[in-house]
Image (spheres, rainbow, N blue to C red):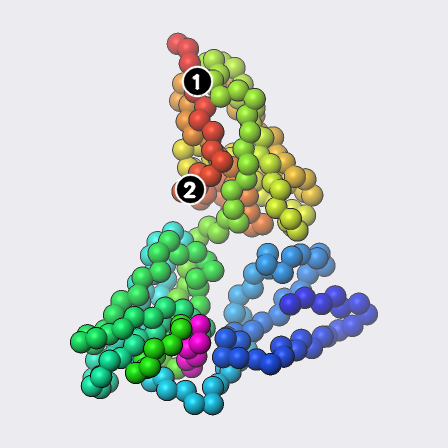
Amino acid sequence: MMEPLVNKDEHTFILRNVSVLDSGNYSCVYSFNKYSIRNVRASDYNSVQVQVTDDAPDFQPADIFGNTTVKAGEDIQLKCSMFGKRKSGDIHIYLCKNGVGIMMEPLHNRYQYTFILRNASVLDSGNYSCVSSFCKHPPKDVAASEHNSIQVQVTGIQLIKSAVLRSGRTIVKKGEDIELTCSISAPDKPQILHVFLCKDGLGKIYKSLYNQPYSHFSIKNVNLEDSGVYSCMYSSEKYDVSEVNDTERENSILIKVYGE
């Protein structure tokens, strides 16, 4: 949610008719610029934990184990265990993030299950916990307190998305120049963007854009080693070029340099 503070020092946001899905960590940030809400990111520093409870919850806490620090692009493995707590009957185990269920697995005759969140991003950072139930619920309907939870922090690059890359020529003679253009058509983009030209998935050249929809890159006096797959990415955050890794290479272009 967003509200301009015109001649005000504070504003009260109201979430009406809440459900257990509204449980989570809430925090406030401000800016002199207006951004699309989906582009705003905030840490849980100085946040408050809001727990919306159901009238008749039937969930029981389970133990959770796993790595608390993961690099972006790696997998998060979290083990939910009912060892010493297992009762007879079919039990469903739920993995919860910030108090809300995100995944479910029937235990059958097992005492534990390892949930895997593949190709993690910084958005997967949060408090994770496990609960169990004899009843099967949609994960989104499961609410859990963050007692016995672990804090998982995903670190590293979080690029917004790939940009469209264009080139006048894809076959270039040795010694000539390559001219490439990255076009960004995302609505409600921030005024300042950081654009990265990648070769074979690795960051090569960096530029900052101010309220512009495209960026030009020139590679002068090319040689055979400049042949490769080029792609373009952008972010609202500034990173060192050496940190950027485009694993998906969307809208990429194959450039071939020929000659002796």
Q: Nearer the viewer, residue 116 or 92?
A: 92
Q: Residue at x 68, y 66 (%)?
A: 2
Q: Earlier in the sequence, mark 2 or mark 1?
A: 2
Q: Position of residue 132 (x, y in %)?
A: 32, 80
* 173 falls in the magenta region: no
Which residue lies under the disc numbered 1? 257
User: Which secondary structure dominates the residues rendered in magenta?
Assistant: loop
In this picture, is 251 found above or below 160? Answer: above
Gap in angstroms between the C-alphas marked 2 and 1: 23 Å
Please give the label number shown on residue 247: none
Is label 2 in contact with label 1 (beta carbons under 8 Å)?
Answer: no
The magenta-colored residue range is 140-146
> Residue 248 bears which disc, if any?
2
Which residue is drawn at the image coordinates 44% and 68% (left, top)? 126
Side of 162 relative to 1 (left or right): left
Identity of the amino acid at label 2? Glu
Q: Nearer the viewer, residue 139 or 231?
A: 139
Q: Nearer the viewer, mark 2 or mark 1?
A: 2
